[in-house]
């Protein structure tokens, strides 16, 4: 599973670096019923929705908004049925996670998972202009990281590839709008809990369930530019043959 995932990451980064365009460049609209590709990065704000039991070790903790502006590349393939209806799918990398504060212990925990994301959805409105879009996102976590801070000093860190601390897949639904100049605002809700609450680990010979009683879903607000504003490639100018004035 690792080799296909890493290959997809490399290809995605290559597309992202070679095809960046200014968000303020007026789009050149591809013709309807043709495939075209857009790409860019996202700014991601995560709001944890905590469902912690009162008697759990996680009870009483406060969720903190997490801002992840980096390493969220995405490429989308579009097909527009008309000037007002279109479809899209693609591939991306997402930096998902949340932060928990425990004021009583002066402790903070940061949880993060890099995922390979596969979105799919429908667009309604003026294609390449102002429109709304709806869809579904499937995320495959491939790297998990957890940090614990006490008195603002990091005291513990865990990092794992294809960790079993999280579910194997995250399922999300999304709704968003594209404003003028290609500015996109998307709201996503991940209805798969971030952690596997049945995960067990052994610490100093004692088995424990670190996420028992904690069920965290993520509500995300993302900002990006140009993801639904297609641009045609410049294929060069055709120079017409000279006309013989005698004919």
Image: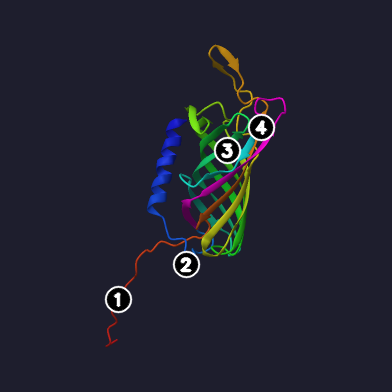
Q: Secondary structure at mark 1?
A: loop
- Label 2 and label 4: CA atoms lie apart by 44 Å
Classify residue 54 by image quadrant: top right
Give the labeled residue for mark 4: 215
Q: Main secondary structure of the magenta part?
A: strand
Q: Are marks 2 and 4 in contact (CB under 8 Å)?
A: no
- Label 1 and label 4: CA atoms lie apart by 70 Å
Give the labeled residue for mark 3: 98
Give the labeled residue for mark 2: 26
Q: Nearer the viewer, mark 2 or mark 1?
A: 2
Residue 56 in percent (x, y) is at 68, 25
Q: Nearer the viewer, mark 3 or mark 1?
A: 3
Q: Which residues are magenta?
A: 35-59
Residue 134 in percent (x, y) is at 63, 52
- Between discs 2 and 1, the one toward the N terminus: 2
- Label 3 and label 1: CA atoms lie apart by 63 Å
């Amino acid at each position: 599973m690792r080799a296909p995932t890493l290959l997809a990451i490399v290809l995605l980064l290559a597309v992202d670096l070679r095809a960046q365009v200014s968000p303020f460049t007026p789009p050149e609209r591809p013709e309807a019923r043709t495939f075209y590709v857009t790409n860019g990065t996202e700014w991601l704000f995560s709001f944890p929705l905590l469902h912690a039991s009162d008697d759990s070790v996680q009870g009483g903790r406060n969720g903190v908004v997490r801002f992840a502006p980096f390493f969220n590349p995405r490429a989308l393939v579009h097909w527009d049925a008309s000037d007002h209806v279109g479809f899209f799918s693609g591939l991306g990398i997402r930096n998902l996670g949340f932060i928990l504060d425990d004021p009583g212990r002066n402790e903070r925990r940061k949880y993060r998972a890099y995922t390979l994301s596969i979105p799919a959805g429908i667009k309604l409105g003026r294609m390449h202009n102002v429109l709304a879009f709806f869809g579904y996102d499937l995320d495959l976590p491939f790297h998990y990281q957890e940090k614990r801070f006490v008195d603002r000093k990091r005291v513990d860190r865990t990092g794992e590839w294809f960790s079993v601390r999280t579910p194997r897949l995250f399922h999300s639904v999304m709704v968003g709008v594209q404003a003028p100049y290609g500015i996109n605002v998307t709201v996503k809700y991940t209805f798969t809990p971030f952690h596997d609450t049945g995960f067990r680990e052994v610490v100093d010979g004692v088995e424990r369930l670190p996420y028992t009683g904690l069920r965290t879903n993520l509500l995300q607000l993302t900002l990006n530019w140009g993801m639904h504003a297609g641009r045609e490639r410049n294929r060069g100018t055709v120079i017409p043959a000279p006309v013989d004035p005698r004919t």
